[in-house]
Image (cartoon, rainbow, N blue to C red):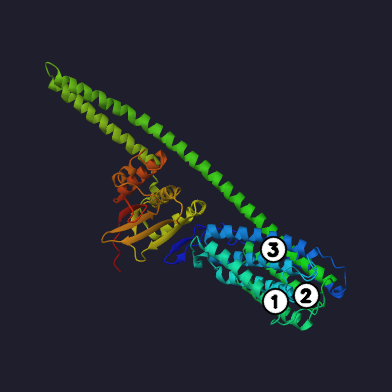
Amino acid sequence: MFARIVRSGEVVPQDHLGIFDTPAGRREVRLGIFIVVAFLAILLITLPFRNVRLAEVTAFIPVVNSIMFVGEIIIAAILFAQAAVFRSRALLVLASGFVFSALLLVPHTLSFPGAFTREGLLGAGPSSTAWIAATRRIAFPIFVALYAFLIPDLPSRAVSHKPGSIVVAFASAIALAVGTTLVAIFGDRWLPPFFINHVDVVPGTLFVTSMVAIAVTLVGIAMLLRKPLSVLDLWLLVALATWLIQSILNLPLTARFTLGFYALFLLMLAAHLIVLVALIAESNRLYARLALATAARIREREAQRLSIDAVAAAISHEVGQPLAAVSLSTSAGLNWLTAPRPDVAKAIESLHATNESVQRSFDVLKSIRAMLAKEPGWAEEVNINELVTDTVAMLDRELAGARVSVQLELSADLATVQGSRVQLQLVMSNLIANAIESLASTSGRRRRVTISSTQEANAILLEVSDNGAGIAAEDAWSVFEAFQGAESDVRGIDLALCRTIVEEHGGQIQASRGKQQGTTFQVRLPSIPPKAA
């Protein structure tokens, strides 16, 4: 989920991965201000001539509404896609608002007098079309205000949702649009009259609805401005500012097919197209950034593999010679002992040579270890909870790309451990990466990794569990053998390295099948007793 990382119902802040949490840059802010100023200029130019009657262009409303319908559905699709990845309830509400707004354009077009027939196709009253338009004008700022209320100041307050929530949200928007349409059409006789005929408006009703639209639009703007603007917030703010300008222009109109009427719908169309283009551009920009980061990460991993190959070749060369001497000395000793006339002295000499070769092998390994070890970071106290949260934050892009959520269940009162933070973080990153790979083939359920920490008597228990396919009980130990990993040879090497590091820290690591599904890795590390006060 953007990799949403839940810890006791909260979510750990992540790097900016979506249009809803990426801060708006100065260029975007300047462009938004320019657009709003341009619309204000159009308002000031149009207001003196707002009620000048123009020709009745019957195709105007169907054309404008069709363009807006397509644009709003595309915007809703972008937002639903973001909601699916990041599991944000706020994005669900906003996407549903765009679906609702788009769907109201259909009955508005069909019922508009003169668009297809003199009285409209739906058999509605003279005011039904206006009430549909007024509902749409009022509803959009309300959905934006709800989004601004639900979206957190920090991602840690966001609430996850089930995958089926998108279907429910979409169906709710459809049901709300159908209900609004039925009320506007069949309740026309009970609603206050909006039009005297198909052209002339009732000023009182228009004034009240316009003032309500202005009020809710101001509320939406205030809700967006109460926190730093993201890219999405900025363009929603531009849309609401344009919505406010439209409502001000709509307030003094007296009839349809005037200069103000045509300007009103053109401003509405322009506002939605601006939001559409901005969201598509920002989504593409974020995708490009993610693609570049992924390519860089692939190159880095390839370089690491080459480095491993080089180290393996060096170890093979350095250790191969003393081991070959061990083999020769051992064979010679056996030959002296099994000869028709055994020569014990020669056999003892060969065994001494074998022992010396073994010692040389250990010396070579120690020298390689000393060369590769990060001695400055070894003797330090490590806070396991901080290590876990830092590692998860470091891997947030991999988690987001794989659509894996991480639930943290970290005990608050943990002692520290003595060791290398770098090496222990390598263990944690390898275990999380292993979980991501094991979840790659998981479908039909939410992909989840659970990381928990518990204080035991003299140790800290760290568990990393996933809900993937799991491992067989007989394979629980073999996964830590090099080239025996469940996913790949490289993964086997990584898990073998994890075992080596944990054991060098005086701890233990084991794998088991989860209680219900998936795999659980348990790491026990000796803890440092708390210092006396």
CB-based contact (under 8 Å), mark 1 and mark 3 = no
First along the sequence among labels 2 and 1: 1
**Front tag of 1 and 3:** 1
Binning the other alpha carbons within 10 Å of mark 3 as few (below 14), some (14 to 19) or many (20 upward) gives some
The amino acid beneath tag 3 is: Val
Instruction: Give the residue type at disc 2.
Output: Asn
Q: Which residue is mark 2?
A: 250
Question: What secondary structure is marked by label 1?
Answer: helix
Where residue 72 appears, as percent x and y from the top left, is 67, 62
The quarter of the image holding the C terminus is: bottom left
- Circles 2 and 3: CB atoms closer than 8 Å: no
Side of 54 where 492 appears, left or right: left
Q: Which residue, given by chain and number where applicable, does mark 1 sit on?
A: 213
The structure residue drawn at horizontal position 26% and vertical position 33%, both measured from the top left corner, is: 359
Whether residue 144 can be seen here: no
Numbered mark located on residue 85 in the image: none
Circle number at residue 29: 3
Q: Tell me where residue 403 appears, x and y as whole percent.
A: 49, 54
